[in-house]
Amino acid sequence: MGLITCNKRYYQKTIRQCVKAQEMIMQQQHATKPRPVSMNITEKDETIMSTEIFPTAKVVPMVLTNKEPVILSFDDVPGPKALKHLARFRQYLSEVGTQLTAGFITVGLNVGTYINTRKPLKNLSSLFDEYGPVVRFISPVGSDIVLINHPDHIQKVYTMEGEYPVRSTLDSLEKYRSEHRHHTYGLYTVQGNDWYRQRTLVVNPLNDSIVHHLIGINDVCDSFTGKIYNSRNYQDQLVKDLYKELHKWAFDCMGLILFSKRFTMLDTELVYSQCDMSWLYHSLEKATEAIIKCESGLQFWKLFPTPAWSSLVKYCDNLDSLIGKHVMEAEQSISFTKDISEIKNKSLIHAMLMGEEKMGAEDIATIIMDMLLIGVNTVTSSMSFILYYLAKYQRAQKILYNEIRELNSNLSINDMKKLTDQTPYLQACIKETLRLVPPIPVLTRVLPKNITLDRYNIPRGTLIIMSTQDSSLKEGNYEDAAVFTPERWLKDDAKEYHAFASIPFGSGPRKCLGQNIAETMLALLTAKIVQKYKLEYHYGDIQSTRNFISRPNKPLKIRFVDRP
Ligand code: HEM
């Protein structure tokens, strides 16, 4: 639909150019005849006209025959006009950077969620409806931003990202690291060769870690279902905030994978006590809140320390030192052990410390911090929405329950592949939830080369924001796109879906490192909950917030009714 609107606009523009060219040719012909005094055209005017006529006339046959592609300039990319006037301030505010425009976009999106005005604020999809599939934001302060949502364009960006893909970083975390800690490591935020080196060092130990801890994760999932049993009210809802409980579950699972430790946050009430484990959990929660605040809206923290910035510094410092303690403990245990080969598999931290290329303790702590921040928050968000959709779509829940019941096992497995093969409907439910609510709703790239998108030439270095959530919710890409339909992934037609219409884990060499881990955690807990409880939801529709990691915008009041 957006593509059609855009092409329509393009053709209208070309037709206007064509008419203008014809008028000018006619004027030029008239110019050779004796000229009426009222026209008053000077020699200078004639020169201008003749230089304008030919380029325009040259374009016309190309468009009409539609044989040669016409490349339109970057200036032709449509976008909101208001921001163009702000461009005048560019010279004064250069230090604020590109993200201010991203801030404008985020403010628009977030405010739209909270304020119920008569004239609703624009969200990304209305921008695409208005301007077409390629929208330009002229930044008042930094590089311009281009917004896209068409799967073809998203695919093209990924194919041109190069060997060392560059994503726009979380500015607040990057500033914290470079200015406050004088240390720029961090897998999500680092770029270029450094990124490649880190990723190569982490990828294998991380995959091994999930295999080692399957049984432990299974136990944490059992703790969660047990906790539901023990802490329901008379309406079979959790007395506590379900989102927070899921957050603790994700934290405990990630504790096993990243530290090989049982954090038991689910079982303990000592959330704000003085023990290291609860401080780590508390700091993670607070650091996430502070990053969300800093990344949404106008980024004044770049100019002076705002309360959100001070909170970010405080809690990221906490995280750094608490994780650093675990890394130091691992270093010590290595230095006291004779049989080095045995200890290498003790934890992900041990494996990284003993990798072929030695990594410093601070570097490892930063990588672990990134994985904790991304991993815990994304998995919690997805798990919340899986439960919500299953509770809302009873028919889907019934099919899933039958699939799990037929497995006729207690699901206490240590072979994930077997579980995946035996539960196609469960996998489809996870995939469908991630299509409807990808926890990271927009992905970014800065390309090393110019790229042509929908005939517009986008210069290299432009920040390209890919609205992957908008793409996966578009009717043109999926029929009944807003409806939770896991079956769509099991039909033959699924093969016809565009491979880039729904990419919740990103794509290419820089795609999510934790996909395997996330899918395992989500599958295990969903299976265990549905096996034990019938889920119900009797309240208003829940949507996702549009933060850099989205979450439910309302309390998850799901009922967990015992199955007979
Ligand atoms: C449902 C859960 C998850 C979703 C939907 C998700 C999604 C994503 C996405 C979209 C990206 C960016 C990809 C791109 O730019 O093309 C990403 C990157 C990343 N994710 Fe995940 N993620 C999830 C869970 C996890 C977990 C559990 C971990 C930790 C083990 C993790 C670690 C990472 C890391 C380290 C990166 C940066 C990779 C790099 O820059 O090389 N993610 N994730």
Image (spheres, rainbow, N blue to C red):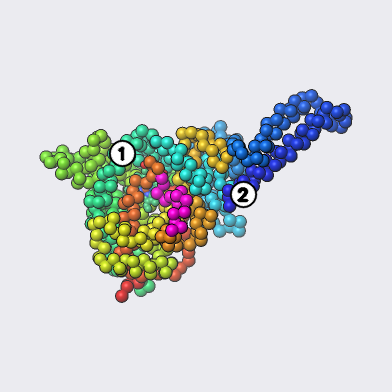
Taking 137 as reference, is 531 left or right? Answer: left
Secondary structure character of the magenta stretch overall = loop
| Residue appearing at x 47%, y 44% in the figure | 155
Q: Circle 1 — which element?
A: helix
From the top left corner, tell me how far across and down residue 68 is, in percent.
Answer: 60, 37
User: Residues under labels 2 and 1: Cα distance?
Assistant: 44 Å
Taking 154 as reference, is 408 left or right? Answer: left
Rendered view: 522 above or below 189: below
Whether tag 2 and tag 1 are in contact, CB under 8 A, the answer is: no
In the image, 531 versus 378, the foreground residue is: 531
| Residue appearing at x 66%, y 35% in the figure | 59
In the image, 17 versus 467, the foreground residue is: 17
Q: Amino acid at mark 2?
A: Thr
Q: Quadrant of residue 325?
A: top left
In the image, 107 versus 36, the foreground residue is: 36
Taking 470 as reference, is 331 left or right? Answer: left
From the top left corner, tell me how far across and down residue 48 is, in percent.
Answer: 73, 27
Residue that numbered label 1 is attached to? 200
Residue that numbered label 2 is attached to? 5
Give the magenta part as a residue range.
492-507
Is residue 255 shown in magenta? no
| Residue appearing at x 40%, y 56% in the figure | 431
